Image (tube, helix red, strand yellow):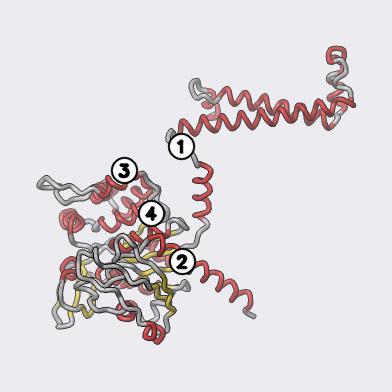
């Protein structure tokens, strides 16, 4: 009997329900008159003297059309007003373009399935561009960070470093500006809070409340109404280690990122970190898988060191695209060309890992860069020798210079995935 609650006083719904019922009565009456049912004329025969003949057959249809039109108008008007009353109560800040909002959300659900793998700022830039075209996004995020607020929370609470996960959640969120500012706010004073980020603390608190870090991510995802899903690469907080070219072994993502010596290879401890089932399922169902952009050795490659993720990438039927950075990164990729980035990925993830390389073809302006960086040269001949398809374009953020523009990158990648899907359809169509 829950429907009786609609009759409670103060809901401002009863008047419109009555109006709708009145409209439906007119509609019913009009249909009866138009259909010229004998039952109706027999029913009103007793009142024929009162109606003065307006129910007679010649005029009955005209009266019926008028009643039907009036009934439809009253019903539609009443329904519209009732819906407005309900929405005003449920969504007091309802946007003007509600229809456009609903349409966009429906159309985004029909978008291609994309898996983005990486970490750091690069991954969040990519997600901001992709979410304008599809909500079927799964971000698989590296959790090897051990610096800053994330590193402190990881060391004190034994949780996954929340920083990169927070950035990805914000990047995919349908949110108010104040919410983004709040989650990104960093305390600048206080012995314990100084340097900590509000979003990091919120994730840490949710993890303790729910007893599971992945559940904490899911809860914050609901609050932010994100377009897609954010998944940590593993629930085991790993330590990232590196073997340098001179044979020295160093450990810790923040230490590796600052090392001036060339890196030979990186590894995880423990080496048997288990991947989440959501990540593996997303890879198996994807239309396109994207690696990068981001720090090559400390953000992108750590995901490939998780055996289950690496195996899933090698087995997937979806194309795997690597988005190469716009600029070299001091300490990690000094002097690297695009093919050297690719070879480092192949050393850690397998020779057949990558199918497509996405490169920037515009010479960026590094005048505003804080560090001494150089554009990554695109050595097309070597990339083709490696059997890779190269896709390029102007992908630079003109305000930042050394980073990708999220809109340009998102647009290019969506065109790529749609082209790939159409190509596969044509191959199936003409295969005999």
Mark 1 → mark 2, Cα distance in angstroms: 34 Å
Image quadrant assignment for residue 349: bottom left
Q: Relative to 218, is 2 above or below?
A: above
Rendering coords of residue 309 (x, y %): 36, 70
Labels 4 & 3 near each other (Cβ < 8 A): no
Q: Is residue 182 visible?
A: yes
Residue that badge 1 annotates: 94
State the residue at coordinates (46%, 58%).
136
Which badge, 4 or 2, is on the more N-terminal residue?
Answer: 4
Mark 4 → mark 3, Cα distance in angstroms: 15 Å
Which badge, 2 or 3, is on the more N-terminal residue?
Answer: 3
Q: Nearer the viewer, mark 4 or mark 3?
A: 3
Mark 4 → mark 2, Cα distance in angstroms: 18 Å
Rendering coords of residue 159 (x, y %): 23, 56
Residue that badge 4 annotates: 172
Label 1 packing within 10 angstroms: few (<14), some (14-19), many (20+): few
Mark 4 → mark 1, Cα distance in angstroms: 21 Å
Residue that badge 3 annotates: 178
Which badge, 4 or 3, is on the more N-terminal residue?
Answer: 4
State the residue at coordinates (32%, 44%).
179
Q: Nearer the viewer, mark 1 or mark 2?
A: 1
Mark 3 → mark 1, Cα distance in angstroms: 17 Å
Residue that badge 2 annotates: 286
Which badge, 4 or 1, is on the more N-terminal residue?
Answer: 1
Label 4 packing within 10 angstroms: few (<14), some (14-19), many (20+): many
């Amino acid at each position: 009997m829950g429907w009786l609650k609609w009759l409670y006083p103060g809901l401002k719904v009863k008047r419109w329900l009555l109006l709708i019922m009145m409209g439906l009565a007119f509609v019913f009456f009009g249909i009866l008159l138009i259909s010229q049912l004998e039952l109706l004329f027999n029913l009103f025969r007793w009142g024929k003297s009162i109606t003065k003949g307006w129910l007679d057959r010649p005029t009955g249809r005209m009266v019926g059309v008028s009643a039907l039109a009036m009934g439809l108008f009253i019903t539609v008007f009443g329904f519209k007003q009732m819906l407005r009353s309900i929405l005003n109560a449920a969504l007091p800040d309802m946007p003007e373009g509600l229809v456009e909002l609903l349409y966009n959300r429906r159309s985004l659900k029909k978008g291609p399935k994309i898996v983005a793998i990486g970490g750091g700022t690069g991954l969040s830039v990519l997600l901001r561009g992709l979410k304008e075209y599809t909500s079927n996004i799964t971000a698989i995020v590296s959790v090897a960070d051990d610096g800053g607020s994330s590193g402190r929370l990881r060391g004190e609470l034994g949780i996954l470093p929340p920083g990169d996960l927070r950035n990805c959640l914000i990047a995919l969120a349908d949110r108010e500006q104040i919410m983004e500012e709040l989650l990104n706010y960093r305390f600048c004073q206080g012995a314990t809070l100084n340097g900590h980020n509000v979003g990091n603390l919120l994730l840490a608190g949710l993890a303790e409340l729910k007893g599971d870090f992945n559940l904490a991510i899911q809860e914050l995802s609901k609050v932010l109404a994100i377009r897609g899903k954010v998944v940590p690469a593993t629930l085991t907080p790993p330590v990232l280690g590196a073997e340098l070219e001179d044979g020295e072994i160093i450990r810790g993502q923040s230490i590796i990122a600052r090392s001036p010596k060339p890196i030979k290879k990186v590894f995880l401890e423990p080496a048997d970190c288990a991947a989440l089932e959501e990540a593996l399922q997303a890879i198996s169902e994807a239309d396109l898988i994207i690696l990068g952009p981001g720090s090559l050795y400390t953000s992108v490659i750590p995901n490939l060191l998780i055996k289950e993720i690496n195996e899933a990438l090698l087995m997937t039927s979806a194309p795997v695209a690597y988005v190469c950075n716009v600029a070299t990164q001091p300490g990690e990729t000094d002097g690297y060309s695009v093919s050297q980035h690719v070879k480092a990925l192949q050393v850690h993830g397998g020779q057949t890992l990558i199918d497509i390389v996405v490169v920037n073809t515009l010479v960026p302006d590094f005048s505003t860069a804080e560090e001494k960086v150089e554009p990554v040269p695109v050595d097309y001949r070597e990339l083709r020798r490696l059997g890779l398809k190269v896709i390029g374009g102007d992908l630079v953020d003109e305000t930042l210079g050394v980073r990708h523009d999220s809109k340009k990158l998102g647009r290019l990648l969506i065109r790529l995935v749609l082209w790939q899907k159409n190509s596969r359809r044509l191959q199936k169509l003409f295969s005999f």
